[in-house]
Amino acid sequence: MPPRRYQFGRADEATHPDSMRATLAEFLSTIIFVFAGEGSILALDKMYKDTSATPARLVMIALAHGLSLFAAVASSVNVSGGHVNPAVTFGALLGGRISLVRALYYWIAQLLGSIVACLLLRLTAGMRPGGFALASGVGELRGLILEIVLTYGLVYTVYATGIDPKRGSVGTIAPLAIGLIVSANILVGGPFDGAAMNPARAFGPALVGWRWNHHWIYWVGPLIGGGLAALMYEYMVIPAAEPAHPTHQPLAPEDY
């Protein structure tokens, strides 16, 4: 586990092969996640004329997001750390686990990955992405607070299972834990605001489908929630001094 540090980035980091591989991994894993997540919604709209929210529909969407995120994180965790989410990257940046240069690369890759996934859905399914919006009767403040709380839980789970130097063997189930918390949070927040917890997940459908209602909530909420979770875990849970004889395997240098 690299020590906590805040830095802009090494002089050669912008063109280093490790940075390029990590950025590509974030781009491809985001495509996997958004294509399956948004695609599950379009598939249900294709299968059923009635697109109103039902328990079965909510469970299927939550399951699709959880499984696809599990696969996306697992397939990129050894290369980029498996962020697949600008809010996770922001939390890692605030926690001193990633440089600013690497964070900027990740953000660009995640947003582009989401856009490409939605363009592929538009091409293959021939349907306009639905995007995220507040449900009827849900005000902007409540939607914002909900996104903060949901994303806090997600990033806290990422820290506990993927970043904490004391995580030990728990690190092997990090992708599964992350997928499960996303599914659980969708079951909670889906009927209210869609439960994005991920600015990139919201941005691709909004751009390709051109649906911008309340879009700012899906940026501000996740970034605040992710930042709070990272700072609290870094400075209140992780010890100031690393253990003298750690019993776990450290992350690779490019991870977080």
Image (tube, rainbow, N blue to C red):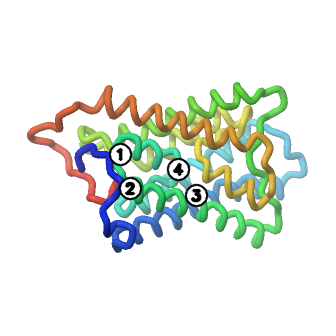
Residue type (three-letter) at the residue carrying disc 4 = Pro
Whether tag 4 and tag 1 are in contact, CB under 8 A, the answer is: no
Whether tag 1 and tag 2 are in contact, CB under 8 A, the answer is: yes
On residue 86, the disc is 4
Whether tag 2 and tag 3 are in contact, CB under 8 A, the answer is: no
Neighbour tally class for label 3: few under 14, some 14-19, many 20 plus, Cα within 10 Å: many
Q: Earlier in the sequence, mark 2 or mark 4?
A: 2
State the SS at label 4.
Answer: helix
Residue 32 on image: x %, y %: 57, 63
CA gap, disc 1 and disc 2: 8 Å
96 to the left or right of 187: left
CA gap, disc 1 and disc 3: 19 Å
Residue depth check, mark 2 versus mark 4: number of the one nearer the observer: 4
Residue type (three-letter) at the residue carrying disc 1 = Gly
Neighbour tally class for label 4: few under 14, some 14-19, many 20 plus, Cα within 10 Å: many
> Which residue in the structure is indicated by mark 2?
81
State the SS at label 3.
Answer: helix
> Which residue in the structure is indicated by mark 1?
162
The residue positioned 59% from the left and 41% from the top of the image is: 197
Residue type (three-letter) at the residue carrying disc 2 = Gly
Q: Earlier in the sequence, mark 4 or mark 3?
A: 3
CA gap, disc 2 and disc 4: 13 Å
Q: Earlier in the sequence, mark 4 or mark 1?
A: 4
254 to the left or right of 62: left
28 to the left or right of 132: left
Residue 110 on image: x %, y %: 55, 59
